[in-house]
Image (cartoon, grey):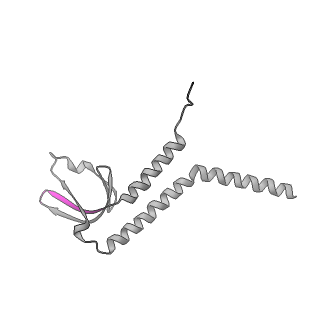
C-alpha cells in the first residue's frame, strides 16, 4: 500500500515538474506583465506631471508614413521604434497626433527576458566537434 502511494506521488510530482518546465515560465511571464500593467495604471492615476512624460508626434499625412511606425498593443499602450509606452494623453493638432507617454522600461525587460528564456530553452544547439 505504501509503495503504491509513493509511486503515485512520484508520478504526480514528475508530471507537475514537466508541466512547470513546459508552461511555468509562460505563466510567470503573463502574471508579470499583468502586474506591471496594474502598476503603470496606478502611476498614471497619480496625475503624472507633463514634464516627466515623453512626447511622440505622429504625422497622419500618407507621404510621411509615420502612422505605420506605431503599433497599438492595447487601447492605451503602444510600441514605437521597439520601445513600449503607456499613453497618458493624446492630442490632435492639425495633421498630427501627439502622444504623451510613460516609457515602460519594465515591460520591455519582462518581454526581453521571456524571449531570451524561450530562445535558450528551445534552440537547437549542436555540440562542438573537436
Q: Residue drawn 49% across and 43% down?
A: 119
Image quarter hosting the N terminus: bottom right
Residue 122 lies, with reference to residue 29, above or below; the image says above
Is the magenta region chiefly helix, strand or loop?
A: strand
Q: Height in image: 36 above or below 12? A: below
Outermost residue toward the bottom in this view: 46
Q: Is residue 101 magenta?
A: yes
On the picture, is 126 further left or further right than 42? right
Residue drawn at the location 44% of the way across and 60% of the way down: 33
Extreme-front residue of the structure: 130
Identify the residue shown where x is 52% and y is 38%.
123
For the image, the number of numbered tags is 0
In this view, the residue farthest toward the top is 130
Left of 43 or right of it: where is 55?
left
Residue toward you, 43 or 19: 43
Instruction: Determine whether 52 is above or below 11 in the image.
Output: below
Verify whether residue 96 appears in magenta.
yes
Q: Magenta stretch: give its range.
A: 94-102
Instruction: Identify the image quadrant of the C terminus.
Output: top right
| Residue 118 image offset from top left, x and y in percent | 50, 46
Q: In the image shown, does 115 or 97 lie closer to the viewer?
A: 115
Q: Is residue 68 left or right of residue 19?
A: left
Most distant residue in the left direction = 94
Residue 58 location in percent, x, y?
19, 54
Residue 105 quadrant: bottom left
Instruction: Please tell me in which quadrant of the rendered image residue 121 appears.
Output: top right
Residue 89 screen position, x and y as percent: 25, 67
Taking the spot 39% from the left edge, 59% from the top edge, the residue there is 106
Residue 39 position in % (x across, y down): 40, 68
Amino acid at each position: 500500500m505504501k509503495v503504491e502511494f509513493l509511486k503515485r506521488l512520484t508520478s504526480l510530482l514528475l508530471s507537475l515538474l514537466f508541466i512547470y518546465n513546459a508552461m511555468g515560465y509562460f505563466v510567470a511571464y503573463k502574471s508579470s506583465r499583468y502586474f506591471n500593467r496594474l502598476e503603470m495604471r496606478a502611476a498614471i492615476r497619480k496625475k503624472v506631471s507633463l514634464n516627466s512624460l515623453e512626447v511622440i508626434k505622429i504625422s497622419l499625412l500618407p507621404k510621411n508614413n509615420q502612422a505605420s511606425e506605431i503599433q497599438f498593443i492595447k487601447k492605451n499602450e503602444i510600441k514605437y521604434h521597439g520601445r513600449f509606452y503607456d499613453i497618458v494623453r493624446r492630442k490632435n493638432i492639425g495633421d498630427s497626433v501627439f502622444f504623451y507617454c510613460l516609457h515602460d522600461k519594465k515591460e520591455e525587460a519582462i518581454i526581453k527576458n521571456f524571449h531570451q528564456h524561450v530562445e535558450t530553452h528551445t534552440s537547437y544547439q549542436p555540440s562542438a566537434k573537436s
